[in-house]
Amino acid sequence: SNVENGSVKWESPSNIALVKYWGKRENQIPENPSISFTLSNCKTITEVTYTKKEGDNFSFDVIFEGQINEAFKPKIQTFFERIEAYVPFLRDFHFKIETSNTFPHSSGIASSASGMSALALCLMSIECSLSELEVNESYFNKKASFLARLGSGSACRSVEGELVVWGNNKSTESSDLFGVKFTEDIHPNFKDYQDAILLVDKGEKQVSSTVGHKLMFSHPFAEKRFEQAHEHLAELKDVLISGNQKRFIEIVESEALTLHAMMMTSMPYFILMKPNTLEIINKIWQFRVETGSNICFTLDAGANVHVLFPKAEADKVYEFIKTELVAYCQNGHYICDTVGKGAKKL
Ligand code: PMV
C-alpha cells in the first residue's frame, strides 16, 4: 500500500457480564463461556493517527485525557506483540493513540474492555484503509472482537450490543476466539435494561484480572465452576427469550457471588467486597421483598455494585437509590447507564 498517513476514531463502551468469565488458558482462551450486556454511557473514545516510518520496531505514543501517558505503554506493547501476526502493518507506522474515557479515571470502573476494543476497532479501520478492500461488517466486527480479546478478554464483548456471548457453548453459536451478538429475540422484559453503577470503592484493584484468572489454575472448585457457567449460560439464553425475571435475577446474582466465592476460596485468597457492598446487597434484597421490584445486582472483580433493573422501573428504582443506597457510595458517587448497541465509528 502507498498510504503514508491518516487517522481514525472510534468510541467503544464498557460491558457488564451476567455470566462471568473467570479463568483462562494460553492466548486469552476462556475456560468458560460468558454473556454480557453492552453498556452505553461508560465508554472510551480513541483516535489513532498513523504515519509511515522506517525501521522495524513498534513505535507509538499514548495520550490519555490530553496528557502523554507512559503507564499505559507496556500494556499496549504487549497487545501489539500478541496481535502482530494478524495486523501485519504494525511495524510500518508510528501511531499516536489519543484516548479518553467518559467515566472518571479513578472510579474503580475497569477501562480495559472499552479501551482495548476501541483500539482494536481503530486498527481494523486502518487495515481497511491500507488494503483498500471492501470488508463486510460481520467480518470487520468479528476480527475487531478477535483482536480486542487479545488485549483484554472481556473487551471482545464490547464491539457489538446489546447482549454478546463469548466462549464455546453447546447451546449458542459462539466461539472462544471472539464475541458474537446474541441474535435471538429478547423478551420485552429485558429490552433497554438499566445499570446503575454504585461506586463503593474507587481505589486501585486489589487483584488484577491477570492474577485472578491465574488463580483458577489450581483452584479446588474450578472444574465444577466452569461446568456451572455452561449451565447458567444455556439457561439464561432461554430466560432472555421467555422473559422469566425471577430466574434472571437468580442466575445473575448467583454468578456475581460465585465470582467472589472463587476469589475467597483460592490460594492466596481475597475478599474484594467492602462492608458497603454487603449493605447495598441487603438493601436490594429487602427492597425486592417489600416492593416486588425486579431489581438485582451484579459485581465485577471489585467492591462496586451494578444495580440492574427494567426500564419500566427506572423512576421507582432511582428514587430508592437516592434515598437508600447513595449513603453507601464513596462521596455519594454513582453512574447511570443503560444497555447499548456497541461501538461506533466517529
Ligand atoms: O477481561 P479481563 O481479563 O479483565 O477479565 C474480566 C473478568 C470479569 O470482569 C470479572 C468478568 C467478566 O466476564 O467480565
Image (cartoon, rainbow, N blue to C red):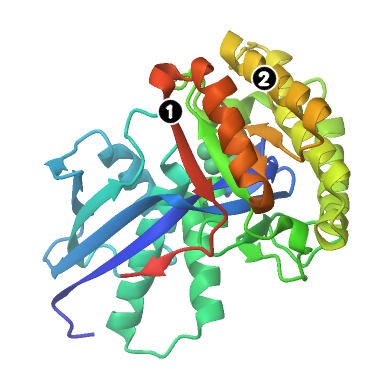
41 and 188: which is toward the camera: 188
Residue position marked by numbered label 2 in the rendering: 263
Question: What is the x, y in percent for residue 126?
Answer: 30, 73
Does label 2 point to a residue whose CB lies under 8 Å from ligand 1?
A: no
Question: What is the x, y in percent for residue 161?
Answer: 58, 63
Q: Residue at x 57, y 29 (%)?
A: 321
Q: Secondary structure under badge 1?
A: loop
186 and 311: which is toward the camera: 311
| Classed neighbour count for the residue bearing mark 2: other residues with Cα under 10 Å, few (<14), some (14–19), many (≥20) | many
- Left or right of 73? Residue 81 is right
User: Which corner quadrant of the image does residue 344 belong to?
Assistant: bottom left
Disc number placed over residue 275 in the picture, else none: none
| Classed neighbour count for the residue bearing mark 1: other residues with Cα under 10 Å, few (<14), some (14–19), many (≥20) | some
User: Which corner quadrant of the image does residue 174 belong to?
Assistant: bottom right
User: Is the residue 251 above or below the residue 192 in the image?
Assistant: above
Disc number placed over residue 108 in the picture, else none: 1
Mark toward the start of the polypeptide (2 vs 1): 1
Q: Residue at x 68, y 60 (%)?
A: 191
Q: Residue at x 13, y 68 (%)?
A: 51
Does label 1 point to a residue whose CB lies under 8 Å from ligand 1?
A: no
